[in-house]
Amino acid sequence: MTERDEDYYGDQCARCGSSADAVWCDNCDRDGMSHHDCGEDVCCCLYPEDNVPCDWCDGRGWFGVCLSTPEFCEANPLPGRENVKRGTTEPVYVKRGVG
Ligand SMILES: [Zn+2]
Ligand SMILES: [Zn+2]
Ligand SMILES: [Zn+2]
């Protein structure tokens, strides 16, 4: 009997499969919200909280960054990933080594 036994390994570029890193987003100060918008022309909220998702990072607060050069990333997409934008990352899981 075996269990699913995988460890989170890191992120990889969803386009070319290279290792990827994450950098915090400056636009929203890492919280994923860029500014306050309550629908009023003149905001009179007592405590205006940021409630508009940051469009730089899609509200995540960070960017995925492909560690390969832009040229490599553009020229070497994984099969079926030709339309994936550089900067899209995905988590990678690896099987835990036995013994
Ligand atoms: Zn952001
Ligand atoms: Zn407001
Ligand atoms: Zn890439």
Image: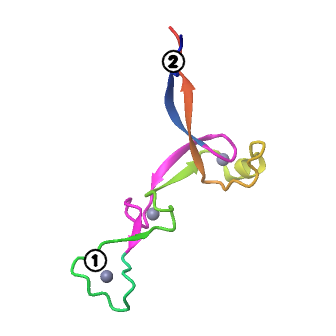
Asked if labels 1 and 2 touch by Cβ distance under 8 angstroms, the answer is: no
Query: Which scheme is used to colour this image of the protein?
Result: rainbow
Badge 1 marks a residue whose secondary structure is: loop
The answer to whether 68 appears left or right of 26 in the picture is right
Image: 32 above or below 99: below
Q: Is residue 2 magenta?
A: no
Q: Please give the label number shown on residue 48.
A: 1
Residue at x 47% of width, y 52% of height: 23
Badge 2 marks a residue whose secondary structure is: loop
Where is residue 63 drawn, in percent x and y?
51, 55
Ligand 2 within 8 angstroms of badge 1 C-beta:
yes
Image: 68 above or below 28: above
Amino acid at circle 1: Pro
| Pair 2/1: label in front | 2
Q: Residues within 10 Å of mark 2 (few under 14, many from 20)?
A: few
Image: 60 above or below 20: below
Image: 80 above or below 32: above
Residue at x 60% of width, y 52% of height: 88
Where is residue 12 drawn, in percent x and y?
59, 41
Q: Is residue 21 magenta?
A: yes
Query: Looking at this rendering, what residue extends furthest in the bottom direction?
Result: 41
Gap between marks 2 and 1, in whole Å? 48 Å
Residue beneath disc 2: 3
Residue at x 78% of width, y 49% of height: 75
Amino acid at circle 2: Glu
Residue at x 46% of width, y 67% of height: 54
The front one of 79 and 38 is 38
Where is residue 93 drawn, in percent x and y?
55, 31
Q: Quadrant of residue 46?
A: bottom left
Give, as a single range, the part of the protein colored magenta: 13-35
